[in-house]
């Protein structure tokens, strides 16, 4: 079966950090929505850059480049975040990715992103 991404990368986890989703889970959700991304990365946040904790992001760049990034979360929060992602947030992000190429010309000509964050212990989304 063909991977739903052009490239895949995974950062090395530091002590105290865990992935809130599995590679196969992300691949299955992308396939279920018909989405294909240029790159899928499991990334460790730079501690200095952590403000509102990012959990997942999908980015669209003009020319049709889609990228999906799953961010590591503190191990103490991983089970709760994983349950929320599996409860619909991952599917929502993958549907956003699947829909992106068919949006109108004005939208596709500019950069966009869907960010899933966890500012107060519950996931929320911000589209930019």
Image: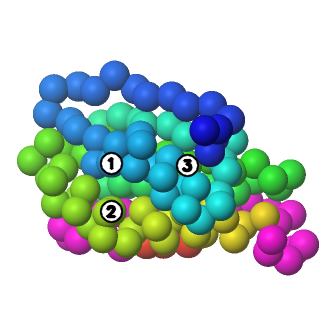
Earlier-in-chain disc, 2 versus 3: 3
Disc 2 residue crowd, few under 14, some 14–19, many 20+, Cα 10 Å: many
Separation of residues labelled 3 and 1 (CA atoms): 13 Å
- Name the residue that disc number 3 marks: 68
Q: Is residue 27 left or right of residue 65?
A: left
Earlier-in-chain disc, 3 versus 1: 1
Q: At numbered mark 3, what does the secondary structure look like: helix, strand or loop?
A: strand
Disc 1 residue crowd, few under 14, some 14–19, many 20+, Cα 10 Å: many
Q: Is residue 107 left or right of residue 16?
A: right
Q: Which residues are magenta?
A: 102-124
Do we see residue 71 in this rendering?
Answer: no
Q: At numbered mark 1, what does the secondary structure look like: helix, strand or loop?
A: loop
* Labelled pair 3, 1 in contact (Cβ < 8 Å): no
Q: Position of residue 59 (x, y in %)?
A: 63, 55
Q: Nearer the viewer, residue 118 or 10?
A: 10
- Name the residue that disc number 2 marks: 85
Q: At numbered mark 2, what does the secondary structure look like: helix, strand or loop?
A: helix
Q: Is residue 13 above or below residue 40?
A: above
User: Residue at (66%, 48%) from the top-left corner?
Assistant: 37
User: Residue at (72%, 67%) from the top-left corner?
Assistant: 100
Do we see residue 43 in this rendering?
Answer: yes
* Labelled pair 1, 2 in contact (Cβ < 8 Å): yes
Asked if residue 104 lies in the magenta stretch, the reply is yes
């Amino acid at each position: 079966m063909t991977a739903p991404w052009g490239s895949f990368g995974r950062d090395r986890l530091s002590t105290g950090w865990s992935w809130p989703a599995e590679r196969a889970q992300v691949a299955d959700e992308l396939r279920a929505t018909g989405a294909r991304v240029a790159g899928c990365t499991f990334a460790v946040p730079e501690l200095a850059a952590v403000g509102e904790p990012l959990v997942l992001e999908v980015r669209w760049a003009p020319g049709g480049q889609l990228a999906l990034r799953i961010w590591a979360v503190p191990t103490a929060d991983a089970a709760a975040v994983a349950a929320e992602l599996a409860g619909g947030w991952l599917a929502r992000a993958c549907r956003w990715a699947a829909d992106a190429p068919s949006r109108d010309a004005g939208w596709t000509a500019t950069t966009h992103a869907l960010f899933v964050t966890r500012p107060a212990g519950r996931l929320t989304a911000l589209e930019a």
